[in-house]
Image (tube, rainbow, N blue to C red):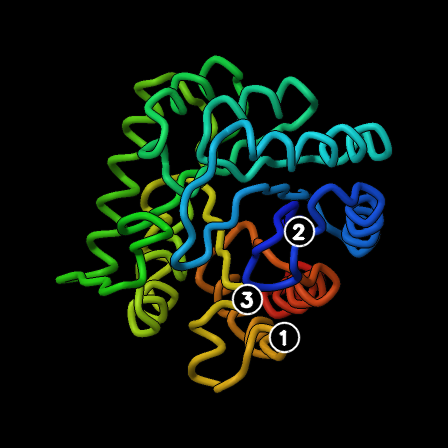
């Protein structure tokens, strides 16, 4: 899953806002490099970020969605949003997946909306909100608590009528570096939920802080953790760097004998 930010304030690879041509060029590069899904987002969820309105988000993402869907009609597009209105309009415009960092907590209409749209739904764990999540994240047992949260969300999604659910433990969303690595070490335990697992590790602080680098210099660490995520059962890697992630996937397949 390649990350396409239509935001002016992302933590890495600053968004292109209304620059549709730049978004198209990035989409083409990612698809050529082997991206299976393009995840388009118009609302930054980096630590300290305030939530934005659905209308502001739509102004940012809709031109890109319409242009990419027209240019690459066979591409799978995902909308990274916590607003039901955005999800609805994006799917109407050709998006195939809804990726919600709040798992329906920020918009009570989200689950019912996704169920009515009949598209897959990515539900993520986050402690707090983007504005507060990194102030003082605390858990008694981060793996157990995130697992229970996602189990509850899967139950709520199924009850709402969502058939296809993908789970995301939310690396970097209300977690310390130690919490993130505890989740990565135990990522295979989430397979008991019977849902595909998405791992979003790309250039995050759990890489930057131990290596003492900024996101610009976190590709090598990202590659290392992506391999571990795959070995721990991740089904989808959400990344800024598609070519390198695709190479990791091929190496993992050879390691496991599936390409021999």
Q: Nearer the viewer, mark 1 or mark 3?
A: 1
**Measured from the top left, where is residue 188 in percent x and y?**
38, 58
Instruction: Sort mark 3 into few (<14), some (14-19) or many (20+) by Cα contacts within 10 Å.
Output: many
Return the residue nearer the eye: 5 or 234: 5
Horizontal placement of 52 versus 16: left or right? left
Displayed quadrant of residue 11: bottom right
Q: Earlier in the sequence, mark 1 or mark 3?
A: 1
The residue furthest left is 140
- What is the spatial separation of the Cα atoms under label 1 and label 3, in whole angstroms? 17 Å
Q: CA distance from mark 2 to mark 3?
A: 14 Å
Packing grade of label 1 (10 A; few <14, some 14-19, many >=20) is: few
Mark 3 and mark 2 in contact (Cβ < 8 Å)?
no
Place of residue 224 in the rendered image (x, y in percent of width and height, measured from the top left): 55, 75
Q: Which label is found at residue 2? A: 2
The x and y percentages for residue 92 are 64, 17
Q: Secondary structure at mark 1?
A: helix
**Which residue has dot 3 on it?**
226
In the picture of the structure, the residue carrying the numbered disc 1 is 216
């Amino acid at each position: 899953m390649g990350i396409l930010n239509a935001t002016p304030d992302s933590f890495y690879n600053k968004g292109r806002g209304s620059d549709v041509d730049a978004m198209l060029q990035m989409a083409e590069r990612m698809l050529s490099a082997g991206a299976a899904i393009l995840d388009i987002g118009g609302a930054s969820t980096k630590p300290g970020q305030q939530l934005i309105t659905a209308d502001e988000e739509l102004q940012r993402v809709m031109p890109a969605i319409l242009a990419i869907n027209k240019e690459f009609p066979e591409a799978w597009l995902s909308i990274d949003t916590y607003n039901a209105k955005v999800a609805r309009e994006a799917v109407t415009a050709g998006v195939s997946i809804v990726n919600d960092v709040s798992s329906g907590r920020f918009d009570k209409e989200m689950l019912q909306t996704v169920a009515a749209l009949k598209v897959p739904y990515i539900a993520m764990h986050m402690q707090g909100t983007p504005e507060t999540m990194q102030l003082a994240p605390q858990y008694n047992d981060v793996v157990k608590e995130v697992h229970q949260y996602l189990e509850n969300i899967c139950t709520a999604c199924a009850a709402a009528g969502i058939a296809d659910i993908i789970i995301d433990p939310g690396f970097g969303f209300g977690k310390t570096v130690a919490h993130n690595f505890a989740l990565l070490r135990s990522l295979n335990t989430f397979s008991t939920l019977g849902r595909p697992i998405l791992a979003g590790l790309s250039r995050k602080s759990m890489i930057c802080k131990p290596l003492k680098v900024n996101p610009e210099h976190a590709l090598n660490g990202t590659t290392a953790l992506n391999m571990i995520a795959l070995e721990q059962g991740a089904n989808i890697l959400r990344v800024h760097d598609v070519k390198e992630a695709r190479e990791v996937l091929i190496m993992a397949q050879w390691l496991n004998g599936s390409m021999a």
